[in-house]
Image (spheres, rainbow, N blue to C red):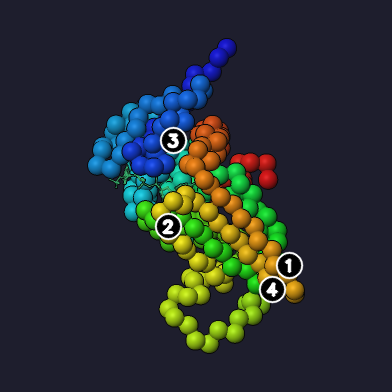
């Protein structure tokens, strides 16, 4: 017996990512696009969607998720801006809906997920680590969600290994020249037209450096991860943060 296609809605459907997701869902035989909404459109228009993919804006995503969880709809979320407070609220909302799944991934590109994993493995071996993220100039947030997530994972691995802050002789600094600090890791953001989404994780130690770099050169790079998320979330209750938990990593 053939299974019915999963009914999918997209929020942020006219945006750079949302429009790409709409095409990817339309091209997948086991999925059916039932709604494609953008800013200002009533969420009632999601109709009978089973899973909603959100690529909107950090200011909008929590309102969308409150609505989706309240209405028993699974969610796959690429939108950035998730703090511990936001995640705690979602866990609380999901506790009342034990059958429902929400997957939030700072980055849906396979290579980005692998780069974060490799960086976490490398972190305890090096005295210093810094992250450089490079994006298109229409991006609203800095640092990127991926870079913040990477820095947090490196920070946790460094703390677990008992590493002291990386040696740094800087005593005089133009504001921002050493980047932002996320969990003890410096993060630098570059914004240029022509870029899509890129990240370099740099480690320095005794007489050597290690650089791990990932480049998304097209938004199609995110689509296999998004579609995997849609197929997985329907049978993965609770809150999942990071595609690494869905891939066998
Ligand atoms: N996790 C991942 O792999 C990736 C995550 N992202 C993240 O996804 C988000 C979107 O990125 P991108 O597509 O480039 O951004 P865009 O600005 O191109 O698209 C966002 C779209 O969402 C719309 N929107 C805003 N608020 C709402 C709302 N409440 N309901 C429905 N639609 C809304 C916007 O409309 P309007 O312009 O009128 O406000 C816009 O059309 C960002 O947070 C980005 O960092 C991006 C790429 C990959
Ligand atoms: O805005 C983007 O473009 C991207 N946003 C995500 C982020 O902030 O990490 C993922 C990817 O870097 C592209």
- The residue identified by callout 4 is 127
Front-most of 108 and 170? 170
Residue in view at x 46 percent, y 29 percent: 25
Q: Which residue is mark 3?
A: 21
Give residue 32's quadrant in the image. Answer: top left
Which x, y percent locates residue 154? 62, 63
Q: Is residue 48 above or below residue 143?
A: above
Q: Earlier in the sequence, mark 3 or mark 2?
A: 3
**Circle 4 residues within 10 Å: few <14, some 14–19, many ≥20:** some
Tell me the CA gap for discs 3 and 4.
40 Å
Residue at the far bottom: name it.
171
Decide: marks 3, 2 in contact (CB < 8 A)? no
Mark nearer the N terminus (1 vs 2): 1
Whether the residues at callouts 4 and 2 have beta carbons within 8 Å, the answer is: no
How much space separates mark 3 and mark 1, taking CA atoms? 39 Å
Mark 3 vs mark 2, foreground winner is 2
The residue singled out by tag 2 in the image is 192
Q: Residues within 10 Å of mark 3 (few under 14, many from 20)?
A: many
Location of the N terminus (image quadrant) = top right
Disc with the residue nearer the chain's start (3 vs 1)? 3
Element at badge 4?
loop
Q: Which residue is mark 1?
A: 125
* The one of 80 and 45 positioned closer to us in this rendering: 80
Circle nearer the viewer, 1 or 2: 2
Q: Residue at x 46, y 62 (%)?
A: 190
**Quadrant in the picture for the C terminus:** top right
Upstream in sequence: badge 3 or badge 4: 3
Label 3 within 8 A of ligand 1 by Cβ: no
């Amino acid at each position: 017996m053939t299974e019915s296609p999963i009914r999918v809605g997209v929020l942020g459907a006219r945006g750079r990512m949302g429009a790409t997701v709409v095409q990817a869902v339309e091209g997948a035989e086991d999925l059916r696009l039932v709604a494609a909404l953008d800013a200002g459109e009533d969420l009632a228009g999601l109709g009978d969607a089973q899973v909603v993919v959100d690529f909107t804006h950090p200011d909008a995503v929590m309102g969308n998720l409150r609505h989706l969880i309240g209405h028993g709809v699974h969610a796959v979320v690429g939108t950035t801006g998730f703090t511990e407070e936001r995640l705690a609220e979602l866990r609380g909302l999901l506790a009342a809906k034990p059958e429902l799944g929400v997957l939030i991934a700072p980055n849906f590109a396979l290579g980005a997920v692998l780069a974060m994993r490799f960086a976490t493995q490398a972190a305890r071996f090096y005295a210093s680590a810094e992250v450089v993220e490079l994006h298109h100039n229409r991006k609203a947030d800095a640092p990127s969600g991926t870079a913040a997530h990477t820095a947090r994972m490196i920070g946790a691995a460094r703390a677990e290994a008992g590493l002291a802050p990386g040696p740094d002789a800087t005593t005089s600094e133009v504001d921002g020249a050493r980047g932002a600090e996320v969990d003890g890791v410096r993060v630098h953001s570059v914004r240029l037209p022509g870029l899509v989404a890129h990240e370099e994780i740099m480690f320095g130690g005794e007489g050597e450096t290690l650089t791990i770099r990932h480049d998304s050169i097209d938004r199609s790079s995110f689509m296999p991860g998004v579609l995997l998320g849609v197929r997985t979330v329907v049978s993965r209750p609770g809150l999942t943060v990071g595609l690494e938990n869905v891939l066998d990593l």
